[in-house]
Image (cartoon, grey):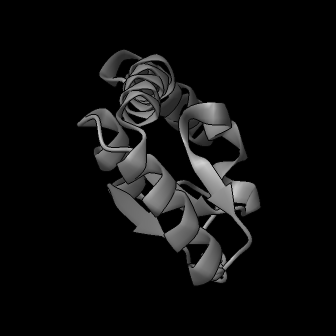
Amino acid sequence: MLLFIPRSLSGKADIPLTVLEALATGRPVIISDLPQVAGLGDAVLRVPAGDDRQAGLLLATLLAEPRRWEAMAGRGTAVVRARFGPQRCATQYRRLYSELLG
């Protein structure tokens, strides 16, 4: 389980690697509902930014419901494979470098 509930990502425009690593290894993620994580869809559980109370309630729910835990883990692994796998990242980097180099 990863609890990641910052109030902001300090201007970062992307999803923190820690979040992607947790999802890729089948760990459910409870995260602050920030614009940067919108693309993760239902693979994560969201709480208002910095809301440790709500995060704790969601954590207790997941611990009490093993099937929900397993479903979250499966969705997380699937979204990382589909959106952040090696082929997709390589393609995006090639596109970015081609654009930058003209």
Q: Name the quarter where the N terminus is drawn.
A: bottom left
Q: Which quadrant of the view contains residue 53?
A: bottom right
- Please identify the residue farthest to the front as the structure is shown: 64
Residue 87, percent across and down? 36, 16
Q: Position of residue 76 (x, y in %)?
A: 44, 32
Residue at image position (53%, 54%) is: 15
* Residue 10 visible in the displayed image: no
Report the residue at 72% width, 63% height from top.
34
Quadrant occupied by the C terminus: top right
> Is residue 63 among the parts visible in the rendering?
yes
- Residue 52 is situated, as x and y percent measured from the top left of the image, at 57, 81
Residue drawn at the location 55% of the way across and 29% of the way down: 98
Compared to residue 30, the image places residue 48 above or below, namely below
Q: Nearer the viewer, residue 22 or 60?
A: 60
Identify whether 47 is placed above or below 98.
below
Tell me which corner region of the image, top left, top right, bottom left or bottom right, holds residue 43. Answer: top right
Q: Residue at x 64, y 33 (%)?
A: 42
The foreground one among 47 and 11 is: 47
| Count of numbered badges drawn on the protein | 0
67 to 58, vertically: above or below: above
**Would residue 75 appear left or right of 102 to someone viewing this image?**
left
Residue 83: x percent and y percent? 51, 24
**In which quarter of the view is residue 24 placed?**
top left
